Image (cartoon, grey):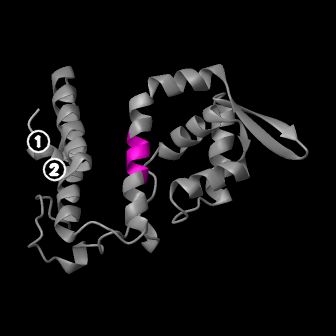
């Protein structure tokens, strides 16, 4: 059974650890968090109506060629978005061309902050996929954070939501800004 105390980099339970950067099934790091691809596809289609293949190429470009989503991931997600009436697909010479619906635009407005998070995670994933993965100590700290959130009792008050989301967002911003920004006076 797994020890549910936060771990630090000195722990050496080899049976309990995946190598840094490896996720489920040994396929390498997970590129998108749950829901990220749906939101990204919706945003890309809102920017410019396009075919599924075009979306694959646009995402590949976002990752500087380090990652290309498979059609087996893209097309089911497009089908889900279409069935959810977020996008509509019109047949054009045998290929569907997708465009965003009014409901899709409203959804994007409601999820603007989440979309910014997706774009930030793409930048991080891009570096990771190019071999600039995080050190073991950072990997363990992320594990500890996820574990702390899982251990939360689940009754989120408005104050607790604000406290935790502010903490996490401020930390993410400080990481992205880097050490130089932290030392500059405001």
- Residue 184 image label: 1
Residue 92 lies, in percent from the top left, at 87, 40
Secondary structure type for disc 1 = loop
- Residue 62 image label: none
Question: Within 10 Å of the Cα at label 1, are there few (<14), some (14-19), or many (20+) other Cα atoms?
Answer: few
Q: Main secondary structure of the magenta part?
A: helix
Residue at 67% of width from left, 57% of height from top? 71
Residue at 12% of width from left, 70% of height from top? 9
Secondary structure type for disc 2 = helix
Residue 35 lies, in percent from the top left, at 48, 42
- 3D distance between C-alphas at marks 1 and 2: 7 Å
Viewer-nearest residue: 182 or 161:
182
Q: Is residue 174 above or below residue 86?
A: below
Viewer-nearest residue: 9 or 5:
9
Residue at 72% of width from left, 41% of height from top? 50
Total numbered labels: 2
Does the stretch in magenta take in 95? no
Viewer-nearest residue: 3 or 102:
102
In the figure, residue 20 lies in which quadrant? bottom left
Q: Is residue 129 above or below residue 174?
A: below
Q: Which portion, as a residue range, is magenta?
A: 117-122
Horizontal arrangement in the rendering, residue 48 relative to residue 7 (left or right): right
Residue placed under numbered mark 2 in the picture: 180
Tell me whether circle 1 and circle 2 mark residues in contact (CB < 8 Å): yes
Residue 37 lies, in percent from the top left, at 53, 46
Q: Is residue 114 above or below residue 20?
A: above
Q: Is residue 156 visible?
A: no
Q: Is residue 83 above or below residue 127?
A: above
Question: Within 10 Å of the Cα at label 2, are there few (<14), some (14-19), or many (20+) other Cα atoms?
Answer: few
Q: Quarter holding the C terminus?
A: top left
């Amino acid at each position: 059974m797994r020890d549910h105390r936060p771990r630090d980099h000195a722990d050496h339970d080899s049976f309990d650890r995946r190598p840094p950067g490896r996720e489920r099934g040994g396929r390498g790091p997970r590129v998108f968090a749950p829901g990220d691809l749906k939101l990204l596809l919706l945003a890309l289609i809102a920017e410019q109506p396009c075919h599924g293949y075009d979306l694959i190429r646009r995402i590949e470009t976002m990752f500087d060629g380090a990652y290309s989503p498979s059609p087996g991931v893209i097309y089911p997600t497009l089908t889900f978005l279409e069935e959810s009436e977020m996008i509509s697909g019109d047949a054009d010479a045998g290929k569907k061309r997708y465009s965003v619906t009014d409901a899709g635009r409203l959804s994007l407005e409601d999820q603007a902050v989440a979309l910014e998070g997706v774009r930030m995670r793409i930048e991080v994933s891009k570096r990771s996929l190019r071999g600039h993965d995080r050190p073991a100590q950072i990997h363990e700290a992320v594990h500890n954070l996820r574990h702390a959130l899982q251990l939360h009792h689940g009754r989120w008050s408005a104050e607790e939501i604000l406290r935790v989301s502010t903490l996490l967002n401020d930390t993410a911003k400080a990481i992205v800004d880097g050490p130089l920004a932290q030392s500059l006076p405001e």
